[in-house]
Image: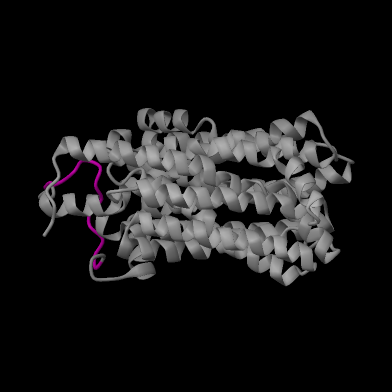
Amino acid sequence: MTQAWHPAEVERIQRRTIRTLLAAQAVGAIGITIGIATASLLARDISGSETQAGLAQTGQVLGTAVASYLLARLMDLRGRRVGQVTGLLIGTAGALLAVLAGVLDSMPLLLVGAFLLGATSAANLSARYAATDLAPEHHRARSLGMVVWATTVGAVLGPNLTGPAAALAEWVGLPPLTGPFALGSVGMLVAAGVVWVFLRPDPLLTARGLAEETPAPAAAPSAEPPAAGAVTQRSWQRALRTAVERPALGAAMVGLASAHAVMIAVMIMTPLHMEHGGAELNIVGFVISVHVLGMFAFAPLVGLAADRFGRPAVLLGGAAVLLAALALCGRAPEGHSWQLTLGLFLLGVGWSLATVAASTMIADLTPLEARTDVQGFADLAMGLTAAGAGALAGVIVGEWGYPELNLFAAVLTLGVVAAGLVGRQRHAQRR
């Protein structure tokens, strides 16, 4: 029997959901970002090859892609709460495997650990969609942006704990570069506990209950025509068909994947570019923390802008900021420089603009019956694209250099531009 929800009760559940996600994101983000500044260095030390330095981050990004899809399927069956906790626990196991890989000097074990660690990133990404399950359309981007913003606390703190975590690991007899992974595992466990205890009732299951008890409107102003066969198809087939039949939705998925690939490709190779110029680990951690600050700190403002000016306008703004960031990074000398610090910051801001806008477009245009399938498929595509870009990043830097990597990333930014233009065309046609 379906529970009847009073509007005031739904609003209360939404507020509780946002509070829970804010707390979990703040703590769990330590586990995601604390190893960013050291993963490529640990992979380089274990493998003895700079060409393979990006493989650990690539493994994590690939793990995020696969886990995004699998966790979406789990959420479809059991709700957001079970899927979130599962992802966080798998990521914890991955972080501990990375520690063991450093102790045993095993590159295969590090890659397995990095792959499993990607499940935490997948849970982190899915939280932004959980924030939109019960949000009204005119506040949807703001709700999504708030949850993205919460990552700022742990994400900025994480890279700055790199030095102390490395010192602590060395003190207890572990390889210094494994310390950040060990400390990150604690943050992920705490986040899992927060979600398990407080994400009740489940926002996705509540939204489905509301849909069952509320007759659908004849024609919502922003709705697309239902995708043929969307209800009967399952999983990736339903997601792909929905995206194909809704061009603006497909464009949003392309924009999301392109922005993430640009950010990952440049970010994972920046620590090596800095180390080549003699930058110390603490300085590397500082620059990465500035980058992460750009990614998350302004997300609520980005959400407000997307609600006020439209998702396509913010997408195009994100593309412009990404191109400015790549121009700065491409001209930055090795080591620590103001160009690299500002470039990494703008790279994060551009990612935030594109990701919040594209993710909200996906939430806007996806029917409830295909919600987890489309969202999981979008994050799968985002992760696979970024994994490919990350793998190429190591090869490009090893063979040609860091400036050429930024030129490659500029080409990828065209996907964000295309998404914004398609979205703007759709908006103009519906006016």
Determine the main secondary structure of the stretch shown in magenta. Answer: loop
Q: 330 or 110, which lies in front?
A: 110
Which residue does the image show at 67% across and 57% down from the upper left?
Answer: 57
- Left or right of 65? Residue 54 is right
Find residue 299 and report its horizontal and vertical position in percent: 48, 33
Answer yes or no: is residue 340 visible.
Answer: yes
**The image quarter in which residue 398 lies:** bottom right
Which residue does the image show at 30% across and 48% down from the upper left?
Answer: 200
Find residue 156 and report its horizontal and vertical position in percent: 62, 36
Q: Is residue 227 magenta?
A: yes
Which residue does the image show at 68% across and 46% down from the upper left?
Answer: 267
Q: 395 or 275, which lies in front?
A: 275
- Left or right of 3? Residue 296 is right
- Left or right of 351? Residue 146 is left
Quarter of the picture holding the C terminus? top left
Give, as a single range, the part of the protein colored magenta.
217-229
Q: 201 or 217, which lies in front?
A: 201
Q: Is residue 392 above or below residue 304?
A: below
Quarter of the picture holding the N terminus? bottom left
Find residue 153 and report its horizontal and vertical position in percent: 56, 35
Q: Is residue 364 above or below residue 377?
A: above
- Tell me how the rendering is colored: one colour
Q: Is residue 262 magenta?
A: no
User: Extreme front residue here?
Assistant: 172
